[in-house]
Amino acid sequence: MSENTYPSVNDLTLEEKASLTSGGDAWHLQGVEAKGIPGYMITDGPHGLRKSNSATTGEVDLNNSVPATCFPPAAGLSSSWNPELIHQVGEAMAEECIQEKVAVILGPGVNIKRNPLGGRCFEYWSEDPYLAGHEAVGIVAGVQSKGVGTSLKHFAANSQETDRLRISANISQRALREIYFPAFEHIVKEAQPWTIMCAYNCINGVHAAQDRWLLTDVLRDEWGFQGIVMSDWGADHDRVASLNAGLNLEMPPSYTDDQIVYAARDGRIQPAQLDRMAQGMIDLVNKTRAAMSVENYRFDIEAHDEVAHQAAVESMVLLKNDDAILPVAGDAKVTVIGEFARTPRYQGGGSSHITPTKMTSFLDALTERGVDARFAPGFTLDLEPADPALEAEAVEAAKGADVVLMFLGLPEAAESEGFDRETLDMPAKQIALLEAVAAENKNVVVVLSNGSVVTVAPWAKNAKGILESWLLGQSGGPALADVLFGKVSPSGKLAQTIPFDINDDPSTINWPGEEGHVDYGEGVFVGYRYYDTYNKAIDYPFGFGLSYATFEVSDVKAVKTGACTATVSAVVKNTSNVDAAETVQVYVAPGKADVARPKHELKGFKKVFLKAGESAEVSFDLDDRAFAYWSEKFNDWHVESGEYAIEVGTSSRDIAGSAVVELDGDGKTQQLTEWSNFMEWRKDPLGSQVLEKLRAEGEAGRMPIVPDNDMTRLFLDSMPINSMSVLMGADGKQIFEYMLAEYAELTK
């Protein structure tokens, strides 16, 4: 076989085909070297390359990896609302994979932040599926543009860590389709990730790795996915069932290839199915051959650090800026308090833990820039009780400062893969220290380090400024200096609502589940979809973020462009003397609907950089999905006819203007039966014709007359027509039979 002629599944023995459907070890595909199929390496992301130093031996070591650029995890990067920047991050990650001979990087993770206590919220993108999909697609497209594969994960409904290896997420079809699937669906259709990683958990009682409906019917047949599906590490519990469901690759290997061979021989696996799964693995190898054949490649460490720097700058969200305390004046006397300023928490814990190529703390950045600031650690980065000596030192350091920058947040022990948080609160010792410092000096700015939201309201009165910096990756120190001292204006927007209390979140009543299952009882009302629909008080809304500049959004217009499509435009103007960026957000608000729908949903966004006084027009094309809900009646997306408001603003609760479009709808109707009620017959185009003919026949004396008064209509409207005799006796039976016969004639 020549070097450029690659094998197909037809060139392999049964045993070789079976071997391709399991890994070679924890970090390698299983090759068939005699047939020219190499066993390439695959390893962790999702915010940078985590290649274990022991990966060549197949061992799992989460804390000993080769140096790689640590970009901001999704908790921060999602707040950038900048898909182009995210694409650059993806490209840089791919270049590092090429250097390290890694064919597939395991990420991004686009599971929904159903509840802010989720232990892996730091590496997921948002509570909103539209934002998650339209941002994370940049990682996939960026990485794969360089010939390296991605693994979109964890498909699907992996929204908690508690009992994650086996818990059943019990979810309605509508919630799956509207909340937990769309980020995956968008990325599959737009970027075709080369691999998808299925989740540990069950969905409605079926393990994701064994769910043919999930992996084949939906993913491949409906969405057109062309790549391979791999298991999460240890999520494949029945290799035969999983392969039949559409799982190409078990990871890591359980050394049970013989199970596949036996099942293929005795007919439990059809030859065509094994061929499809094995050929997918060959196709993956062939896609990555060019990149994996590059020799002696070295990525530019400084260039990648600069990408990480820009990503960190755009990840920060300014929540509060009373008295314009930020940016810090160049001649201000500054005190820095908080161990995070010296020992930054720049990433989350678990399988994504990266060894950075370099690390620059905020204090390092100040030193490099010649900023003379007093520092006191104030507390230790653990969950131990407060140290009175450290507290006293910090309070003393705050005296006489023009501004106190307090670095507070969650230590790594408080959130990580493997467990869910138990509270939204920060450690009590940090809050107590803030109160003590604020009593001594009112000019306090809190800089937060955390992978998911924390409660802010209980302590916010003690800070004039609050900067949510999330986890900023290896270049967070210089990025913080840029923002805090005004070299650049903050431009991040919240990808998560910040509630006042965890008990305000609608999922909390079913969190984290019981007796092996968790009910997603809130349905589609996740995050702002719940808070905004039911007018619940919150601390900071989804999409919120302040700037050093001011902006005005005006001239909102919407035009219907098709039966179920529209275009919306608006003008955004920088009304300040500060160059800065604003993110214009588009929400669709349905009118009266046949199902319970959220008040509004994000359906478009655009980040626009404007110089002082500059303005720009932004426009958005809204397709039919922007107006649709998943109808369990039709088992399909459905756009109802009627009015839709298109809102344009700068957060879900800061709507600058709206316009209304009247849509025709998609015209979908359902077959009427004896179990359809009178109202459904009235609303249906053919059913209404039958009722009109029935009325005419009644007036002519050839049929009984259907009573038409408020009380009778109240009962009839909700009554299946096969029960009309309950109200009308024999006349009801005659009317019921007439309606079915006439409808049958119309539908011939």
Image (spheres, rainbow, N blue to C red):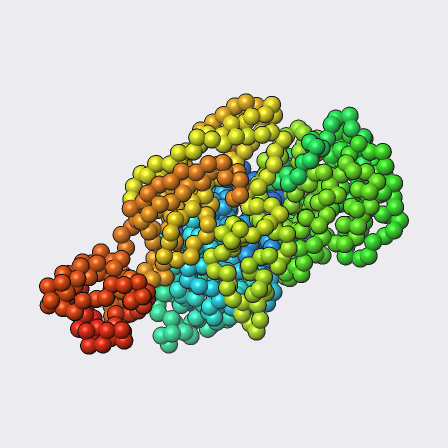
Q: Residue at x 55, y 54 (%)?
A: 113
Instruction: Report the front residue among 233 and 487.
Output: 487
Instruction: Report the front residue among 238 and 725.
Output: 725
Instruction: Report the front residue among 226 and 644.
Output: 644
Q: Report the quarter where the C terminus lies.
A: bottom left
Left or right: 447 as drawn, with respect to 249: right
Left or right: 419 as drawn, with respect to 29: right
Instruction: Report the front residue among 733 and 139.
Output: 733
Displayed quadrant of residue 675: bottom left
Residue 312 seen in the figure: no
Residue 508 seen in the figure: yes
Q: Residue at x 57, y 41 (%)?
A: 544
Looking at the image, residue 147 lies above or below residue 180: above
Q: Position of residue 249 (x, y in %)?
A: 47, 61
Q: Residue at x 56, y 65 (%)?
A: 510
Q: Position of residue 533 (x, y in %)?
A: 49, 52
Displayed quadrant of residue 695: bottom left
Q: Residue at x 62, y 47 (%)?
A: 539
Q: Position of residue 152 (x, y in %)?
A: 49, 53
Looking at the image, residue 550 lies above or below residue 94: above
Count of residue discs: 0
Looking at the image, residue 64 lies above or below residue 521: above
